[in-house]
Image: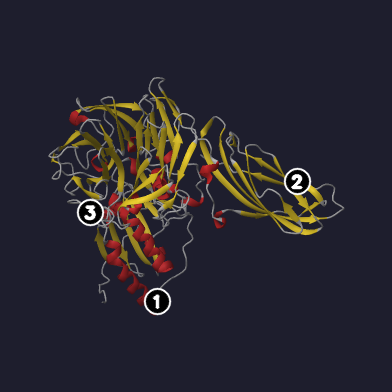
Amino acid sequence: MTFEYKQTVRAPDFGKNDSWLNTDQSFHIKDLRGKVVLLDFWTYCCINCIHVLPKLHDLEEQYGDSLVVIGVHSAKFEDEGETENIRQAILRYNISHPVVNDRSFDVWNAYNVKAWPTMVLIDPEGYIVDTQSGEGAPDTFAPIIGQLARDYAKRGKLDTTPLNLALERDSAPPSLLEFPGKVRVDDASNTLIISDSNHNRILVADRTSGEVKHVIGNGQPGLKDGGFEDAQFNNPQGVQRVGDLVYIADTQNHALRVANLETGEVTTLAGTGEQGRFGSGPAPAKATALASPWAVAWVNPRLFIAMAGPHQIWYYDPAKDEVGLWAGSGRENLVDGPRVFAALAQPSGLTFDGRQRLFFADSEVSAIRSVDTTPGGLVSTVVGRGLFDFGDVDGTGTEVRLQHPLGVSWHEGSLYVADTYNNKIKLLGPGTRSSTTFAGSGNGGYKDGSLLEAHFDEPGGLDVASDGLIYVADTNNHLIRVINPAADTVGTFVMKGLSKVMGEMDDEQIPSVILPVQAVAPGNGSLKIVMTFPDGYKLNPEGGLRISLKGRPGVVTVDDMQTFTMHVPVEIPVTFTAGMGELDVTMDYVYCRKDNEGLCYFGNVKARLPINVTTSAASARVSIAHSVEDPGL
C-alpha cells in the first residue's frame, strides 16, 4: 500500500532561543534536508510519552541515518520546563536523539499541536507529510518512513550522513545508584529494599549498618527469570517485602515479578512482557498483559498494583494466581465515586493504612487519593483538583496544591508524600485534608542539613519505618536520603559491602589506555598501583577497588588474578621472566565524597602495560598511576 500526500505545507522552524540537549549544536529544519524527520512532542511526566520512547528507538534502529527523530519537549508541569530537569529525563529514559526545550510552546503552537504525545512526519524536502497523536503514531508512521526513504533514495535526494551528536549519557559520571525510583522498609527484617531502577536491579540492605545483603538482577535490561545473578529486569519501580518474598513492579517489562530471598530465585508472576491495555475481571496472571506497573502494596491476602499505564489500580491474588481490576475506569481524570467507575490519572505510589484504606499518589492530577480495600468501596480525594491544577501551596482542602507526586507512605495516622516536582516531602492529615511542607527547601539539588534547608531532586518514592525514620528515593540525586524527624535532619544513607554492587562491566564499555613500555628485572617482583582522586573525594573505605590482572604466559606470571582492596597504593605480586611481554590491568573502583560516604561514583579503566624483562633493569617492580576525573557535580 502506497501512502500519498501533497507537498503543500512547509514545516515551521524551531524556536530561536530554545535550548538543545543530547547534541552540541542547535538545528533548523533546513539543516535536516535530505533526511526523513520525525518530531516527537512530549513531556517527561506523561506515561503515554514514556510508552512511545521504545518505539522511537526501534524506528531509529530500523531506518538508521535516513531518519532523524527530534524530541520537542513542551512541558506540562512548571518543573519540567527546566532544561536541567529535561537533561535528567533524557538520561533516565536512555534517549539517544536530539531534544529541544520548547519551554514557551513556540514550536507546539507553530505545528498546532493539541496533546501529548503528538508526532509530525516531515519529508526530506521539508514538507509536512502527516500528524498523528497517541501511542500508536510510531506504528502508523513506520511503513510511511520506509516508503519515503526508498523513494528519495531512488531520486538521489536521501542524505544518509550520520549526525554527530553529543549524547548526555556520554558525559554523565556512573553513580552507585542510578535514578532509584522507590524504596521500602521492612521492619520485621530491619532491611531496606531499593529499586535501583536504571541499573535494572533491586538491592536489599541492612537498615542499620547499610550492608548490602542481596543484589537482585545482573544489571542488564531484559525479562529473564532465574538466580539473582542471572535474572533481568527493565527499570523496576515499586517493591514490597512479605516474609522472604520481594514483590517487584517491573515497569518497562510490564510485569509483576517476585524474588525469593531464601532460594535466591526470581520468578515472573504476572504479565506477558508486552504492554497491555485496560484491566477488567479476574484473569490468569501470566497470560494477562500489564501496562507500566509503578508501585505495589501488600494487603493480605492480595497485592495491589498501581497500574500507571491504564490509570487504574489492579490486584494480584497469589492463591488464585490471577490479576484483576480494583479501581479506575481507565479514563484519565480526577473523578471520585464507586471504585470501578472512578477516574484516576497515572497512579504511581501506594500505601496501606493498616485497616481498610489504600492511599495512592495520583501523579497526573497532582493528587493524593484513597480507595477501600473491601468490596463495594469508594475512591475519594484527600488533596488535588484536576489535570491542570498544580503548584506548591500548603493549607487545607481545595486550596492545597502539589506538583506531580510519585510516592506516599502512611505512618501513625498521617501521610508522608514525595511531592516530586516541588522537590519536597509533604505531611498530609487525611482527616483534615491538611498539607504542610515537612522537609525540603524546594530548591532542586543535593544538600543535607535541617529539614527545611535540605535539598532534594525530584524524589520518586519514600517509606516510613516504625521508629519514625523516613527513607526517600531521591531519584535525580541517585541517592537514598534519610529523614530523622526527632533530630530535625536530612542525611544520606550510606551503603557498605559495595563489592556486591559493582557488578561486571562490559569490556567494550571500559575506557582503554596503552601505557609506555617499562623495563623490569627478571624474578619475583610486583605491580604497584597508585590512584589520585579529585579534591574532596576518596576511595570508598568498604573495599572500593577491584583489580583484575592478566599476564602474557611465559613472560609475566600473576599469582592473584583478581583482588579487592580498601587502600591505595597497592602492590600485587608478579613474576617476570626474560623477554617482551605485557600486563593487562582492569580496575573497577568506587570513590566517594570525603564528607559524605553516601555520595559515591563508579569508575573503571583498562590499561595495557608493555613490559621489557631485562637483566639491565634496576628492579623487578612496575607501576601504574591513574588519575580519577572529577564527576563535576
Mark before the other along the chain sequence, 3 or 2: 3
Q: Kindly tell me whether residue 101 is visible in this rendering.
A: no
Q: Give the answer, above or below, for where 624 lies relative to 539.
A: below
Q: Kindly tell me whether residue 378 is visible in this rendering.
A: yes
Q: Quadrant of residue 30?
A: bottom left
**Label 1 sits on what residue type?**
Ala
- Relative to 411, is 222 on the left or the right? right
**Label 2 sits on what residue type?**
Ser
The one of 219 and 321 positioned closer to us in this rendering: 321
- Element type where label 2 sits in the image: strand
What is the quadrant of the N terminus in the image? bottom left
Q: Give the answer, above or below, for where 593 lies relative to 585.
A: above
Mark 1 lies on residue: 153
Mark in the foreground, 2 or 1: 2
Sort mark 2 into few (<14), some (14-19) or many (20+) by Cα contacts within 10 Å: many
Sort mark 3 into few (<14), some (14-19) or many (20+) by Cα contacts within 10 Å: few
Mark before the other along the chain sequence, 2 or 1: 1
Sort mark 1 into few (<14), some (14-19) or many (20+) by Cα contacts within 10 Å: some
- Element type where label 3 sits in the image: loop
Residue 526 is marked as: 2
